Image (tube, grey):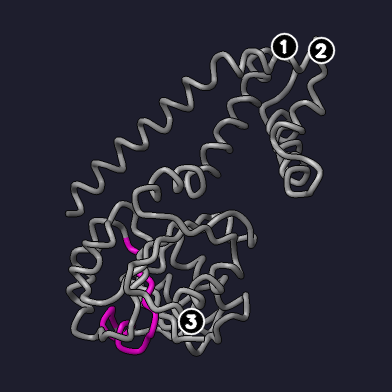
Amino acid sequence: MSRIGIIGTGSMGSMLTRKFIESGKVSPGDVFIYNRTPEKMNDLVNNYGAIGCAGNGEVAARSDIIFLCVGPAEVKDVLPEIRPFLDEKKIVVSIASDVSLKKLSELSGVNVVRIIPSITSEYGAGVSVLVFGEGVPESAREEILSLFGSISRPYVTTEDRISLLSDLTSSSPAIMASIMQQYALAAVWRGGISEEDAEFLVRETFIGTAKLLSGMDYDFSSLISGVATEGGITAEGLDVIEKEIPEVFDNVLSRMSEKHLRVEKSSR
């Protein structure tokens, strides 16, 4: 396994550092990290054995694959800073949303990859969406896919689709949690149950539903038909969902798509 560098140990950078090490795919002594806030970096050094660096340049110099775990606005500053420490054998992997492969390549001068991970990788689940630049060697592709395969289900796509797919993967935990929260609150508003109890019941049922879907017996359609008998009570609720929810989700995806475009424009 190549030496891994992680620039930015915020929530996602910290998660990737921890899970890569815990997966056994990379030795702690081969993970080089830097963060502007020392406390976040020191926790990973002290508790997981990662190697703390004095700056972004040191991370780039000591690593073969450099993960850029910073926001889109910071990419324009970090890549020129580390460019003197890069060569044709190094790979830059960006998790920043809406910074194109072209922009990443122009700023770094090396082969680049875009990855949209998900918080669900904390439990070795969910999907990581990947787009590889044209020049990335096959050996590096396989190594990166193996790395993310140890903490998620990798899904390779094209750059024109990555924003939409990230909405379905990286954004979905928050979207789904919000839906479940609102469903629980609707029961509270009707009376007869506390918010704590309603959230407990919906949350545990949601977890059970996810387990059913993770097996071989159910997909969305078969699970729906298995629970909702024709003319039954659940069917009445589904009728409302089928009539009203499509427009809601179209609006959700439309709003997020507009935000992607604004972020992309500001990162040029």
Q: Tell which of 252 and 200 is nearer to you.
A: 252
Q: Secondary structure at mark 3?
A: helix
What range is drawn magenta here? Answer: 55-70
Q: Which residue is mark 1?
A: 236
Q: Which residue is mark 3?
A: 45
Q: Nearer the viewer, mark 3 or mark 1?
A: 1
Residue 33 showing in the rendered view: no
Magenta-colored stretch includes residue 114: no
Q: Residue at x 34, y 49 (%)?
A: 160
The crowd level at tag 3 (other Cα within 10 Å; few <14, some 14-19, many 20+) is some
The crowd level at tag 2 (other Cα within 10 Å; few <14, some 14-19, many 20+) is few
38 w.r.t. 232: above or below: below
245 w.r.t. 83: above or below: above
Q: Position of residue 45 (x, y in %)?
A: 48, 81
Q: Which quarter of the rendering shows the C terminus? A: bottom left
Q: CA distance from mark 2 to mark 1?
A: 7 Å
